[in-house]
Amino acid sequence: SHYSLLSSLLTLDKSKEDFENSGPISIFSIANKYNLPKILLCDDNMGSFYQAYSKSKEYKKQLIFGLQLKVKADLDNKEDACSSDVIVWMKNSDGYRDLLTINNFAVKNHINAIPHIDWKNLNKLWTKNLTLSIPFYSGFLSVNSTSLDCNTIPEFSKIKPILMVNNQGLPEDTFLEKSVLEYAKNNNLKVLNTHNCYYYKKEHAESLQVLRCIKERSNFEKPELPGFSSDEFCLESYL
């Protein structure tokens, strides 16, 4: 949502019937229009949870909330700059408490103001009230295949993650999917087909690109932003 700063055009505002011509588009407007009973919301901070939870109750939607975090091999190793993303999902109300504990640890151990955790402490703080998924485009398999300097080896001693697979029109999709499926087979892990939505329609992709250029201090004429060779990161492509 918009709580992940400059990363999404979708908000958690009040639902509107005529939302397509009224400025920023609420996730709840979309959910109500298409009669979606569940909302899977992933943000990179906990700031969105209260508003998302309140609106979900108001509109009678099931909210499944996840926190995206950076994970390193070892926080004590200052020379290792490699990290990959995970998403920690709460399974129930107790999961909210446990997710806060993990978030507080990551915020305390931030690197350049970005919350971080390592595999050892993620396993240490893990509970049965949480579920872990590995993002397709920023998880350890993606990082290892696209970076010459990183070879991240995850530690799943207490965690059985779900591997996510996307097909959103990027050149690396086929290669990454093969890597994910092979790893899942070798480690007896579940694979889930997913679709990331950061905006409502394909025509909105350029607007998000402008926001991302601001965030990354890039130039719109030559943005060099990952993922912007496709306009498929929208609900229009999912439906």
Image (cartoon, rainbow, N blue to C red):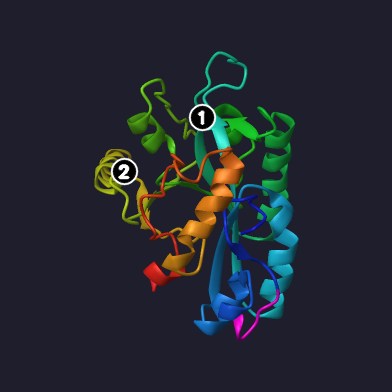
The reply to whether the magenta stretch includes residue 18 is: yes
Image quadrant containing the N terminus: bottom right
Q: Residues within 10 Å of mark 2 (few under 14, many from 20)?
A: many
From the top left corner, tell me how far across and down residue 157 is, in percent: 48, 33
Tell me the distance, in whole angstroms, between the alpha carbons under discs 2 and 1. Answer: 18 Å
Tell me which amino acid carries mark 1. Ser
- The residue that mark 1 highlights is 83
> Can residue 88 be seen in this snapshot?
no
> Can residue 211 be seen in this snapshot?
yes
182 lies left or right of 98: left
Tell me which amino acid carries mark 2. Val
The answer to whether 181 is drawn above or below residue 238 in the figure is above
Residue at 63% over, 32% down: 116
Of 184 and 237, the residue lying toward us: 237
Residue at 65% over, 82% down: 16
Of 222 and 109, the residue lying toward us: 222
Residue at 51% over, 39% down: 85
Q: Which range is magenta?
A: 14-19
Q: Residues within 10 Å of mark 1 (few under 14, many from 20)?
A: many
From the top left corner, tell me how far across and down residue 113 is, in percent: 70, 32
The local secondary structure at tag 1 comes to loop
